[in-house]
Image (spheres, coloured by chain):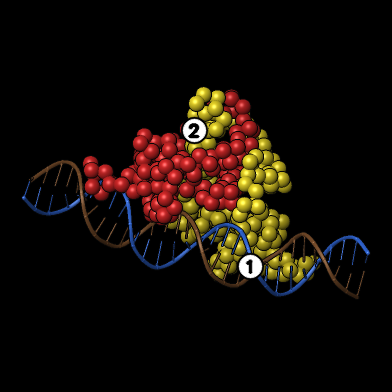
Chain colours: A red, B yellow, C blue, D brown
Amino acid sequence: MSAGDFESRWLAPDVNSVWTRFLQVTHRLEHHIDRRLQEQHGITHTQYEILVRLVDSDERAMRMSDLADSIVTAKSAVTYQINKLSEMGLVERRKCGRDNRGIWVHLTDAGAERLERAAPCILSLVRELFLDAINCDQAAELDKLLGTWSDNLDEHDRNPIGYPGDKDPAGA
Amino acid sequence: MSAGDFESRWLAPDVNSVWTRFLQVTHRLEHHIDRRLQEQHGITHTQYEILVRLVDSDERAMRMSDLADSIVTAKSAVTYQINKLSEMGLVERRKCGRDNRGIWVHLTDAGAERLERAAPCILSLVRELFLDAINCDQAAELDKLLGTWSDNLDEHDRNPIGYPGDKDPAGA
DNA sequence: GCCGGCTGGTTCGAATTCGAACAATCCTAT
DNA sequence: ATAGGATTGTTCGAATTCGAACCAGCCGGC
C-alpha cells in the first residue's frame, strides 16, 4: 500500500493527532468548567453561558432564537434551560409588543448578581487553562483560525451536499 | 469602575471573544459531524470515535477504562455505547485472562468494515471544515497549544484547588 | 380580505450523558 | 495469608440534549 493511498483514505498521522487531541481537549475543558461551576455555584455551564449572553446584551435581554444560535443548541434545549433559570428567578420571560410570538428573556437582578458571583471563578479557570497558554500573536492567529472554521461551517450549512462520490464539484 | 478593574473581573473584549468563538466553533463542529455521521452511516460520533480508537490499537482491542479515557467520557457512558455497538455486532467483549475484572473490547470484522465505510465521509468533512484552514506552521502551532492546554488540564486534575476565595464547606 | 409559507417557541419522546453506589478483583504491606 | 485500599466494569436514576411535530402569529401575493 502506498503512502499516498493511505493518506488519502485516512489522515496523515500528525494531522490526525491534531484532530484527535483537539476533540479531547475541548471535551476536557467543557467537563472541567462544568464540574467546577456546578460544585461551586450550582449552575450548568450552559446556564452560565446564557447568563453571560444576557448580561452582554442591550437591555440585558434576548430572544429565544438568538439565544439558541448564540450558545449553539437546539431551540428546545433553550426552552428547557430558560424554564430552569426562570424557576431559579435568574431570568424572566416578557412579551415584546412588536412581535406577538417573540419572547424576550430578561436577566433579573438576582441573575446578574448570581453571574457576578460565578464569573470570577470561571474566568480564572479560563485564564489558567486556556488563555495563559497563548500570547498575543497566537491569540490573533487563533482568532483567525476560528474565523475560518466558522466560515467553513457557514458554507457547509448553506450548502448541505452529501459526501459520496461528488468529491468533484463539477458544477454546484 | 476603572478599566483595569473591569479587565480583572471580566476578560478583555478581544480575548473574551476568542473564548466565546472557541466554544461556538467546537459545538458546531461536533453537531455537524454527528449529524452527518448519523444520517449517512447510522452511528454516533462517539461510536465512530470508539471504532477509530479500536482499529488504531494493537489487536484491535482496548479495555473499557482506556476507552473511556481516550474519548473523554464517563465509564458508564462507555458501557452504554459498547452495549449498543455490541448489539450492532461491530464490537465484541472478551475476557482477558490476566485480569479477571478487565474486559477487552474487540473490533469485529463487521465493525472494521463499517468504519472503513464511514471514515472517508467523516475524514473529508474534517479536512474541509477543520484541516484545510491550517497550513503546516499553524498545525505545528496548534499542536503546541493543544499540548499546553492538555498539560494545564492535567495539572488541574492533579491539583484540584478551588479558585481563590472558594466557599468553605463549614457554612453548608 | 385571505391563503400559503415562514418564523418563533413549546411540547413530546427518545437517546445519551453523568455521577454515585455497587460488586468483583487485584495489589501491597504487614 | 490477609485486611485495606485501589481499580474495573456495571447498574441505576436524574439531567440534559436533540429533532420532529405542533401551534400561533407574521408576511407576501392574489
Q: Is A150 positioned to the left or the right of B64 in the image?
A: left
Q: Which of disc 1 and disc 2 is earlier in sequence?
A: 2
Residue at disc 2, secondary structure: helix
Res. A84 in view: yes
| Image quarter in which the C terminus of chain A is found | top left
The chain to which mark 1 is attached is B
Res. A145 in view: no
Labels 2 and 1 positioned on one and the same chain: yes
Q: Nearer the viewer, residue C20 or A13?
A: C20
Rate crowding at label 1 as few (under 14), some (14 to 19) or many (20 or more) other CA atoms within 10 Å. some
In the rendered view, tell whether residue A36 sits above or below residue B98.
above
Q: Tag count in the figure?
A: 2
Mark number displayed over residue B1: none
**Residue D6 screen position, x and y as percent:** 77, 59
> Can you tell which of label 2 and label 1 is closer to the viewer?
2
| Residue at x 38% of width, y 53% of height | A79
Q: Nearer the viewer, residue B134 or B160?
A: B160
Residue behind mark 1: B92
Mark number displayed over residue B17: 2
Q: Is A93 positioned to the left or the right of B127 in the image?
A: left
| Residue at x 63% of width, y 41% of height | B165
**Residue B124 screen position, x and y as percent:** 51, 44
| Amino acid type, residue under disc 1 in the picture | Glu
| Residue at x 49% of width, y 29% of height | B13
| Amino acid type, residue under disc 2 in the picture | Ser
In the rendered view, tell whether residue B57 sits above or below residue A160.
below
